[in-house]
Image (cartoon, rainbow, N blue to C red):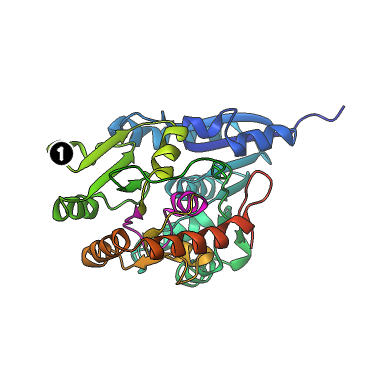
C-alpha cells in the first residue's frame, strides 16, 4: 500500500484546519496525511501573542517538515512572504503552495523598499490568486515570474444555497459582517448618520465595542456560521464596506446574492471577477455618501431591491459546483 503523502497545512483560525472545513476535508478525502497549524483560535482577540504566533507557527512548520514535503499555506499573505523568506535565507527545499494571496490591499501595491524582500519570498513558492488582474499587477510590480502564479477562484463551500425563508425582518435592517479588510470606521459613521435606520453587524473583533450607545445598531460577536447566515437571510440590504481595493468581502456578497438580497460593496478587483456593474451596487473606497444614498434608495424602492437581488443571484448561482468552488 502506498504511503500517504504528508501535507503541512497552515491557516489563520483553528477551524480552518479541522474536520468540517471544506479544504481540510478535501485533503483528507484525497488521501493526504495532514499536519495542521493555525495562528489563532477563532473568536479570540488577535492580541500581541497572536502576532508573535504568526512568526512561531511558520518556523515550527518549516522545522517539522523535510526536504520535498508539501506545505500548504492558506489565506494569510504575510505568512506566505515570511515562509518564502525563511526558505531563501536558509536554503530550504520545500514544495510550498500559497492559496489566496491578497497583496497589500492598496491599489498602489507595496512600498518600493519592501519589494525586493517580498520578491525574494514569493520566488520560492507557488502563489494562488483569485483573478488575473492580481497576477498582472503583482508580477509587474514585484518582478515575479508570472509562472509562479496560478488562478484559484474563491471557494463558496460554506455558502448556504438558500433553500429557506429569506424574508426581511420587521423593521427591516441593513446587514454588515465579516472580519478581513472591513472598514468598520466607515460603517460606524454611516450608522451614526442614519439613526432612523436599523443596522445589524456580525464580527469577530472589538471594532464596534464603542458603539453600545447606538440605539439603531445590534452587534453580534463570534457567532456560528449558521447564525451569521440567519442574519444575512433576514436582512433587507447587505452592506460590505472595505479598506482594500484589491480583494475582500466576496463570500458575504455571495451569500447575500444567494439569498436574493441587494448588495452594496466597496469596488475592488475581486468583486469585478464575479459581478458586473449592474448586478450589485459598487461604491468607491471610503465613500460614505454613496453608501448612505444607496441604502436610502433601496429602502424606498422594493422593485430595485428585487431586481438587484435577482441579478446577483443569477450571476452567482451558476458558478457554484459540488462543494461550491467558484469557477469561470
Task: Name which residue lies at 39% across and 65% down.
Answer: 304
| Quarter where residue 9 is shown | top right
29 or 57, nearer to the observer: 29
**Mark 1 surroundings: few (<14), some (14-19) or many (≥20) residues within 10 A:** few
Quadrant of the frame with the C terminus: bottom right
Residue stretch in magenta: 239-258
Tell me residue 112's x, y (percent): 35, 67
Q: Can you say which quadrant of the picture contains the N terminus?
A: top right
- Please, is residue 199 above or below residue 45 in the view? below
Q: Is residue 256 left or right of residue 68?
A: left
Return the x and y of residue 121 as percentages of the image width and height. 49, 54
Q: State whether residue 80 is above or below residue 37.
A: below
| Residue 123 appears in the figure | no
Question: For the view shown, which residue lies furthest in the left direction?
Answer: 213
Residue occupying the point 32% across, 56% down? 241
Q: Is residue 148 magenta?
A: no
Q: Which residue is mark 1?
A: 210
Amino acid at each position: 500500500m502506498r504511503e500517504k503523502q504528508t501535507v503541512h497545512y497552515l491557516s489563520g483560525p483553528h477551524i480552518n484546519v479541522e474536520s468540517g472545513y471544506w479544504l481540510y476535508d478535501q485533503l483528507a478525502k484525497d488521501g493526504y496525511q495532514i499536519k495542521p497549524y493555525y495562528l489563532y483560535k477563532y473568536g479570540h482577540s488577535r492580541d500581541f501573542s497572536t502576532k508573535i504566533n504568526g512568526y512561531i507557527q511558520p518556523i515550527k512548520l518549516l522545522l517539522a517538515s523535510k526536504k520535498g514535503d508539501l506545505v500548504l499555506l492558506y489565506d494569510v499573505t504575510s505568512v506566505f512572504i515570511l515562509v518564502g523568506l525563511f526558505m531563501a535565507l536558509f536554503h530550504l527545499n520545500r514544495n510550498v503552495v500559497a492559496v489566496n494571496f491578497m497583496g497589500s490591499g492598496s491599489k498602489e501595491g507595496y512600498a518600493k523598499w519592501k519589494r525586493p524582500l517580498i520578491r525574494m519570498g514569493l520566488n520560492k513558492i507557488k502563489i494562488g490568486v483569485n483573478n488575473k488582474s492580481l497576477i498582472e499587477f503583482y508580477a509587474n510590480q514585484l518582478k515575479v515570474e508570472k509562472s509562479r502564479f496560478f488562478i484559484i477562484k474563491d471557494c463558496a463551500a460554506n455558502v448556504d444555497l438558500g433553500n429557506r425563508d429569506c424574508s426581511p425582518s420587521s423593521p427591516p435592517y441593513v446587514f454588515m459582517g465579516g472580519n478581513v479588510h472591513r472598514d468598520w470606521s466607515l460603517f460606524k459613521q454611516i450608522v451614526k448618520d442614519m439613526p432612523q435606520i436599523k443596522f445589524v453587524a456580525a464580527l469577530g473583533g472589538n471594532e464596534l465595542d464603542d458603539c453600545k450607545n447606538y440605539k439603531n445598531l445590534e452587534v453580534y460577536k463570534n457567532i456560528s456560521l449558521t447564525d451569521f447566515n440567519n442574519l444575512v437571510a433576514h436582512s433587507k440590504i447587505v452592506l460590505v464596506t472595505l479598506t482594500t481595493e484589491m480583494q475582500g468581502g466576496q463570500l458575504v456578497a455571495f451569500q447575500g446574492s444567494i439569498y436574493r438580497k441587494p448588495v452594496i460593496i466597496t469596488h475592488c478587483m475581486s468583486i469585478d471577477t464575479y459581478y458586473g456593474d449592474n448586478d450589485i451596487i459598487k461604491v468607491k473606497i471610503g465613500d460614505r455618501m454613496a453608501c448612505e444614498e444607496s441604502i436610502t434608495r433601496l429602502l424606498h424602492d422594493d422593485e430595485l431591491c428585487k431586481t438587484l437581488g435577482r441579478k446577483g443571484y443569477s450571476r452567482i448561482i451558476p458558478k457554484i459546483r459540488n462543494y461550491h468552488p467558484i469557477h469561470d
